[in-house]
Image: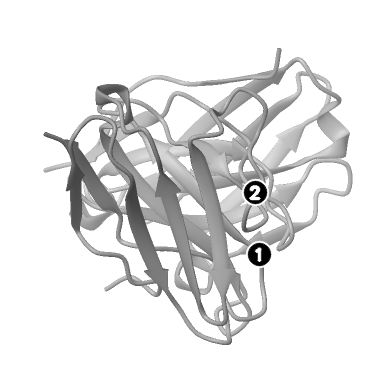
Amino acid sequence: QVQLVQSGVEVKKPGASVKVSCRTSGYTFSTYDISWVRQAPGQGLEWLGCITAYTYTTHYAQKFQGRVTMTTDSSTTTAYMELLSLTSDDTAIYYCARGGRSWSNFDSWGQGTQVTVSS
Amino acid sequence: QSVLTQPPSASGTPGQRVTISCSGSTSNIGNYLVNWYQQLPGTAPKVVIYSNNQRPSGVPDRFSGSKFGTSASLAISGLQSADEADYFCSAWDDGLNGWVFGGGTKLTVL
């Protein structure tokens, strides 16, 4: 079955960067996009962007342009999301999800990674 | 402030039918497919309706979706306590050139 397993809890200081991983299995990695979605405490969902696994093409939300980098490693079928210049507003649970094209949906999700930014 | 507008809460008693609305614009719902996600407490979201009205395998047929113009709705019939969760609508937005979500609706089963 399709599985997305994310890396563990992160605690960072303001100004630092964080890199979260998402290891996938159970499907052909190259045939799907991977999106990243975050959820601040008690808040809704926010899409950060997506990456096409086989072409490494990225598409970032306007809000995060210049501050987020998404990559993939086909040899380990793992996706990565790095967010720079963290502030307390970046404290959230970060999810990876399969899918990203405008006609698709996010049909499988990772378990989430808690990222806390605090001095 | 979310791009898509949902009521913050909804409720019903077991066995009832409840409907959750999602309002958008021609930049999103009006021209793109709508998906609905269910988020049980402390878990990741899960798609319950995709492409406006399609149910993934494993989702009970008590869940249904519809879209008209720039609005969409999720209906849950035969309400069960297991349906108590947050529900989010989502669609592509061509003005923002990305996915947008509603603020979420907390469904309480009384």
Q: Is residue B79 above or below residue A71?
A: above
- Residue type at tag 2: Asn
CB within 8 Å, label 1 to label 2: yes
The x, y position of residue A13, in whole percent, is 22, 42
Q: Could you tell me which residue is drawn at 44 percent across and 53 percent down?
A: B74
Label 2 neighbour load within 10 Å: few <14, some 14-19, many 20+: many
Relative to A66, is A24 on the left or the right? right
Determine which quarter of the picture holds residue B43: top left
| Residue holding disc 2 | A105
Name the residue beneath numbered marker 1. B33
Question: Residue placed at 68% from the left, 62% from the top?
Answer: A59
- Residue A84 visible in the displayed image: no
The chain containing the residue under callout 1 comes to: B
Q: Residue at x 63, y 21 (%)?
A: A23
* B30 or B102: nearer the viewer: B30
Please indicate whether residue B58 sits to the left or right of residue A28 in the image: left
SS class, disc 2: loop
In percent of width and height, residue A66 lies at: 53, 67
In which quarter of the view is residue A29 placed? top right
CA gap between label 1 and label 2 equals: 9 Å
